[in-house]
Image (cartoon, rainbow, N blue to C red):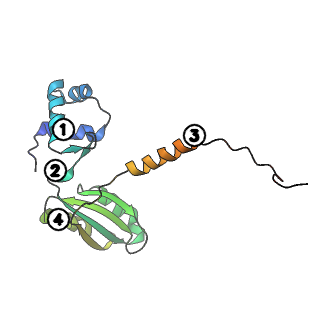
Amino acid sequence: MNNLDPTDLKILLELIRDPRIQIGELSDALGIARNTAQSRVRRLLRTGVLRSGGREVDLEAVGYDVVAFVTIEVSHRELDGVVGALRLIPQVLEVHEISGRGDVWCRVVATDTHNLQAALRQVLRIKGVIRTETVLALHTHIPYRTEPLISGLAKAAGASQHAPAKAPRTAGAGTDS
C-alpha cells in the first residue's frame, strides 16, 4: 500500500468528484500551491494510484486488494431497503438487480479477509437479506473498460459517413411494367 497522506487523499477525492478539474482549480479547492498539486498528481500517476489519464483510482494500489462478487437473495418487499442499506457500506462498489439465481449482485472490495468478513456481516444484517453467496476474484485479466465499445461505434460512424449515399427505393422499383 502506498503511503498516502491527508493531502493525497483530498486530491483523490477531488478528482473522483470532478474528473475534469484543472490543476489550478484543484490547488484552489484544497488551499495548496499549484506546484504542490501538480507534483502530487504526477506522483500519484507514477506510483500507479491514479491511472487512466489520472482520473481513476487503482483501489489495489491504496490497499483494497481483495475483490469479491456477492450474490444476494432478497425478500422482494425489501428490495429498495436492501439497496439503500448497501449504499451505506463503503466497501460496496456497485450493485445490480439481476435475473437468475439471486436478486442482487454487488462488487465488494476489502483490505484483507477480515475486512471482507466485516463487510459481509454488515450485508447479512440488512433487513430483507435472506442469504448471500460470495466469490473471490483471484486475478483481474480484463479490467472494466469502455474503449473497445466506443472505438467500434466511432469506426461504424466513420464508415457510414464515407459510404456513398443510396438512392431512395420507390415502390415497384426494379420491376418492368
Q: Residues within 10 Å of mark 3 (few under 14, many from 20)?
A: few
Residue 132: % across, % down:
29, 73
Identify residue for label 3.
162
Residue 122 spot, x, y in % from top left: 22, 65
Mark 1 lies on residue: 10
CB within 8 Å, label 4 to label 2: no
How far is mark 1 from mark 2, CA to CA?
16 Å
Residue 97 x/y as whole percent: 40, 64
Give the residue at x 26% y 71%: 134
- Picture quadrant where residue 105 is located: bottom left
- Can residue 44 be seen here? The reply is yes
Indicate which disc, 4 or 3, sits on the residue closer to the N terminus.
Answer: 4
- The label nearer to you, 4 versus 3, is 3
Query: What type is the residue that disc 4 sits on?
Result: Ala
Secondary element at image label 4: helix
Marks 4, 2: nearer the viewer: 2
Q: State how far apart marks 4 and 3 are (Cα).
A: 57 Å
Task: Please say if the residues under marks 2 and 3 sit with CB atoms less than 8 Å apart.
Answer: no
Vertical relation: 160 (above or below) 130: above
Q: Which of the 4 image quadrants contains residue 5?
A: top left
> Nearer the N terminus, badge 2 or badge 3?
2
